Every structure is written in structure tokens, then in C-alpha cells.
Amino acid sequence: MAAAAGGDADAAADPEHRAGSAAERARVNVTRTVRAAIEKIAAAHPALGEHLAATVRTGLFSSYAPDPRRALRWEL
């Protein structure tokens, strides 16, 4: 799976993200957990996994941001 875009690159430049800080450890653990969950989802439902991999961002803040120009239709 590709590395998270955005937040991770900016984290290295921020003094609050020094290796070993509590905030950095938490950020890394959240990113790792979210990415592992997306990989498990992708194994069961490839299209959903691809969608989540492209729209979930982690870093200092985490978010789900689908492209508003791309219509989504959820089937339950």
C-alpha cells in the first residue's frame, strides 16, 4: 500500500513530531492501525479498499475526504 500522502511528509518538519515524542508515537500508531484496517477491507472488498486508500488521510489530523466531483453510491 502506498504511503499516506500529505500529513506524513509535513510531520518531519514540525518540532512537535520529533522521533520518540508521545504525539509522534500516537500519530504513527493511528496511521499504522488505519492503514492495516484499510488493507483488511481491501482484501474483502477491493473497490472499497481502493476508495478508502485514496480518501483517508492520516498525520497530525486524520480525515475522510472523498472527491466531491465523483459521485458515490453506497449499497447496504
Image (cartoon, helix red, strand yellow):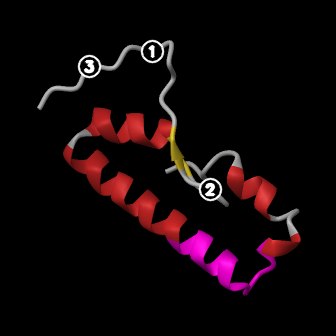
Q: Earlier along the polypeptide chain: callout 2 or callout 1?
A: 2
Tell me where residue 40 appears, x and y as whole percent: 29, 56
At label 1, which amino acid type do we have? Arg
> For mark 1, does the 10 Å Cα neighbourhood hold few (<14), some (14 to 19), or many (20 or more) residues?
few
**Residue depicted at x 68% and y 76%:** 24
Q: Is 18 rendered above or below residue 52? A: below
Circle 3 is placed at which residue position?
A: 73
Q: Position of residue 63 (x, y in %)?
A: 53, 46
| Gap between marks 3 and 1 measured at Cα | 10 Å
Q: Which residues are magenta?
A: 17-29
Which residue type does callout 2 highlight?
Answer: Phe
Compared to residue 63, the image places residue 51 above or below, namely above
The mark tally for this picture is 3
Residue 36's place in the image compared with 67, above or below, is below
- Residue 41 screen position, x and y as percent: 27, 50
Q: Amino acid at mark 3?
A: Arg
Q: Residue at x 60, y 51 (%)?
A: 4
User: Mark 3 vs mark 2: which is more N-terminal?
Assistant: 2
Please name whichever residue, 5 or 65, is drawn nearer the observer in this view of the structure.
65
- Residue shown at 49%/37% (left/top)? 55
Q: Is residue 70 above or below residue 13?
A: above
Q: Secondary structure at mark 2?
A: loop
Main secondary structure type of the part rendered in magenta: helix
Does residue 9 appear left or right of residue 32 in this picture? right
**Which residue ends up furthest to the left in the rendered image?**
76
Mark 2 vs mark 1, foreground winner is 2
Q: Is residue 19 magenta?
A: yes
62 relative to 16 in the view: left or right: left
Q: Which residue is mark 1?
A: 70
Residue at horizontal 62 percent and vertical 56 percent from the top? 61
Q: Quick one: SS at disc 3? A: loop
Q: Which residue is mark 2?
A: 61
